[in-house]
Amino acid sequence: MATPISIEVWNPSGKYRVISTKPMPGTRWIKLLTDQDCRVEICTEKKTILSVEDIIALIGTKCDGVIGQLTEDWGEVLFSALKKAGGTAFSNMAVGYNNVDVDAATKYGIAVGNTPGVLTETTAELAASLSLSAARRIVEADQFMRAGLYEGWLPNLFVGNLLKGQTVGVIGAGRIGSAYARMMVEGFKMNLIYYDLYQSTRLEKYLPIIAYGQFLKANGEQPVTWKRAATMEDVLREADVISLHPILDKTTYHLINKERLAIMKKEAVLVNCSRGPVINEVDLVEHLRVNPMFRVGLDVFEDEPYMKPGLAEMKNAVVVPHIASASKWTREGMATLAALNVLGKIKGYPVWANPNQVEPFLDENSVPPPASPSLVNAKKLGTFPDSLIRPPSADFICDIYGTNLALITN
Ligand SMILES: NC(=O)c1ccc[n+]([C@@H]2O[C@H](COP(=O)([O-])OP(=O)(O)OC[C@H]3O[C@@H](n4cnc5c(N)ncnc54)[C@H](O)[C@@H]3O)[C@@H](O)[C@H]2O)c1
Ligand SMILES: O=C(O)[C@H](O)CO
C-alpha cells in the first residue's frame, strides 16, 4: 500500500487535473497550465526517485495528464492507471525517453511528449567541459591543490593532452552530437570524424569546416578536416577524444564494451553524456585500471544513481551526477515544453510540425503556439493530422488567446 504523497496545488478549481511528479524550475510552466483551466498538483515528496506505487497514488482516480521524470518507470502499469483515471497525456521532462514504453502508452491512447532542442547546446557544453576536464586532468589537479600537496611548479605535474590538431570523434551526430562537434572543431581546431546510422545533414550542412579551414590556412595554420566514418570502429581507432551522443535503445546498449575499448588509443578521452547503459561500465572500470593514461568524463551511469564498483577510485575518471542539461534557461525551457505537451493533448491542439525548432514556445514575452511541441507517438495515435500543426487561423487563435493574435500570426 503506497504511503500518502505530499503535494502542492495551484489553481484548485481548475477543470483539468495535471500532475508533475517533481517540482520543476521556474513558474512559467505553472502559469501556462493554470491560465488554461488546469489544476496543477506538484509532488513535493522528499525522496528523489518515486516508485510506480507512489505515482499510482499521485494519479488517483481522476487525472488528465502527467509530467514525469526520466528516473521513473513509465510502462504498462502506469499508463493503464493513467488511462483508468481518464488521462490522455504524459510528457517526460527530458529529450531521452528510454524510460517510457511508448507502445504501452499508445495502446491506452496516451500521448507521450519529450523536450528536444532546448537542451542541445547546454548538454553539448557539458560534454565539451568533460572533454577538457578529462584531457587536462582538471579534477585531479583541483583535488591535489585542496589536499595541500602543491609544492611548486614542476615540468611533469599533471601533464595532459593538447586538443588542437587532434581528432574528435562523435558517435550519434544528432542534435547534441552535432552541436558538440561544432564546439570542438570551431573552438579547439580539432579534426572531426563522426559515426551515425544516418548521414548527419544537420552537421554536414552547418559545419563551416571548409571556410574555417581556408581561414586557418590563410592565417598560416593547419586547416581542420572532417569525415563521416563507415563504421563505429573507425571512429574508435582514429579519434583522440570520443563523445557518445546516441539515443539509448537496443542498438546502443553496451555499444562501448571491452572489445571496443581495446581498439581505442591508449591515451584517448571518452565522454558520455547520453545514457549510462551505452557503456558497459564494468568493462570500462577494468580498462581504466589497466590503462592509466586513458581518461573518461561521465555524466551518466549504467545503474544510476550508483557507480559500478571501482569507478569512484579511478583518478582517470571525471564523474558528475547527470547534470548535462542543468542550465537555468534549459531546465525552465524543458519544464515549459513538457507542460505544453500535456496541455496541447488535453486541449486537443495539433502537434508542432518541427520539434527541432521549439523557440516559439520558449519566448517568455509571447504566448506559445497552440500546439504540443513534441509528441513522439502522435502519428501512431492517429489523432493528429499528418501535416501536424495547422496554420494559425484567426478564429482558432482568437478563441484561445484573445488579444494576442498578432504575436502568433507574425
Ligand atoms: N546527460 C544528459 O543530461 C542528457 C541531456 C540530453 C540528452 N541526453 C541523451 O542524449 C540523447 C541524444 O539527444 P539528441 O537530442 O541529440 O537526440 P537526436 O535524436 O537528435 O540524436 C541521436 C542520434 O543518435 C543516432 N543513433 C541512433 N542509434 C545509433 C547507433 N546505433 N549508432 C550510432 N548512432 C545512432 C541517431 O541517428 C541520431 O542522429 C538523448 O536521447 C538522451 O538520451 C542526455
Ligand atoms: O534526456 C534528457 O533530457 C536528459 O538526460 C536530462 O536532461
Image (spheres, rainbow, N blue to C red):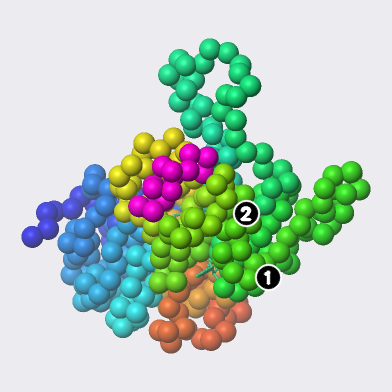
Dot 1 or dot 2: first in sequence order is: 1
As drawn, 199 above or below 51: below
Q: Which residue is mark 2?
A: 239
> Is residue 252 in sight in this rendering?
yes
* Circle 1/circle 2 CB separation < 8 Å: no
Is residue 355 rendered magenta in the image? no
The magenta stretch is 281-294
Comparing 373 with 303, the one in front is 303
From the viewer's perspective, is 336 left or right of 231?
A: left
Q: Which residue is mark 1?
A: 201
From the viewer's perspective, is 370 left or right of 31?
A: right
Question: Can you say which quadrant of the picture contains the N terminus?
Answer: bottom left
Give the residue at x 43% y 43%. Answer: 290
Q: Position of residue 338 (x, y in %)?
A: 43, 62
SS at circle 1: helix
Is residue 293 rendered magenta in the image? yes
Q: Quadrant of residue 310?
A: top left
Give the residue at x 44% y 35%. Answer: 315
Label 2 near ligand 1 (CB < 8 Å):
no
SS at circle 2: loop
